[in-house]
Amino acid sequence: MSGTFLFDGQPVPFEDGQTILQAARAAGHYVPHLCWHPDFPAHGSCKLCIVKVAGRHVSSCAMPAKDGMEVESNTPEINGERRALLQMLFVEGNHFCPSCEKSGNCQLQALAYELEMLTPRFNHFFPDRPVDASHPDVLLDFNRCIFCELCVRASRDVDGKNVFALTERGIHKHLAVNAESGRLADTDFSAGDRAASICPVGVILTKRVGFASPIGARKYDAQPIRVVAMQEDE
Ligand code: SF4
Ligand code: FES
């Protein structure tokens, strides 16, 4: 079965089984997202992809497209809500971009620029989670995690290693390494793993390559994320 729905007033065709986000993207419409990745099933945690359908907010990465539905996405209201979600992510972690080597290549930062986030608006939580520099080739800064579980999924489903997990609940939720010591060096993780290059923010960092791209040549310097994301498989 296939059909058509309206995305911000534009007709978008879809095939049975496609979500709103997938169909919109295939038709050239960017929908902001952080926890969705084209190679993995929807996760539904970040909520950046929210759209409005018949007056209700839904996660477009998880909601199947339906014939005749009217979807609002790029509106001041929805973008304002997306901006608030980003602001919450910024204050929950230590996202101090000027000292982060992912700056310019970071999806969280690029989306904040895209959605014109000027201030964090809420009080900072200032978490204090020690970094893990035990591995010879990869550093982990747990204070920048946005809990998208992409590394968990990539390590488990692609690398077959199960190196990462999210543990505890609520505000105490954090990324953990599956080793008795909790140290990355005590796993079989390698810098060539899919999980090593999938983090959309600055948690999983390959050592000795940081700050290699000059300002102006970084991923999101010349074009905004809405353009870059549509050109590549992220
Ligand atoms: S470390 Fe990165 S990829 Fe893994 S859950 Fe956190 S933000 Fe997502
Ligand atoms: S991209 Fe849909 S909830 Fe994260």
Image (cartoon, rainbow, N blue to C red):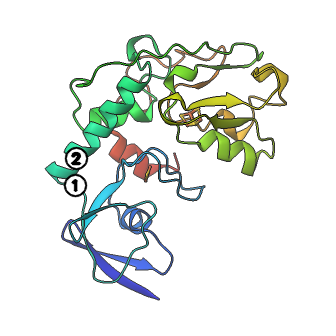
Residue under circle 2? 79
Ligand 2 near label 2 (Cβ, under 8 Å)? Answer: no
Residues under labels 2 and 1: Cα distance? 6 Å
Mark 2 Cα-neighbour bin, 10 Å: few <14, some 14–19, many ≥20: many
Examine the rendering and report whether any part of residue 184 can be seen.
yes
Disc number placed over residue 74 in the picture, else none: 1
Measuring 20% from the left and 43% from the top, which residue is drawn there?
80
User: In the image, is 33 to the left or to the right of 162?
Assistant: left
Nearest to the observer: residue 58 or residue 100: 58
Q: Quadrant of residue 97?
A: top left
The residue at 43%/72% (across/down) is: 64
Three-letter amino acid code at the position of disc 2: Asn
Name which residue lies at 35% across and 46% down: 227
Horizontal side of 84 relative to 61 (left or right) equals: left
Q: State yes or no: discs 2 and 1 in contact (Cβ < 8 Å).
A: yes
Coordinates of residue 152 in the picture (x, y in percent): 66, 42
The answer to whether residue 220 is visible is no
Q: Position of residue 60 (x, y in %)?
A: 38, 61
- Which label is found at residue 220? none
Q: Which residue reaches farthest left? A: 76
Q: Amino acid at mark 1?
A: Asn
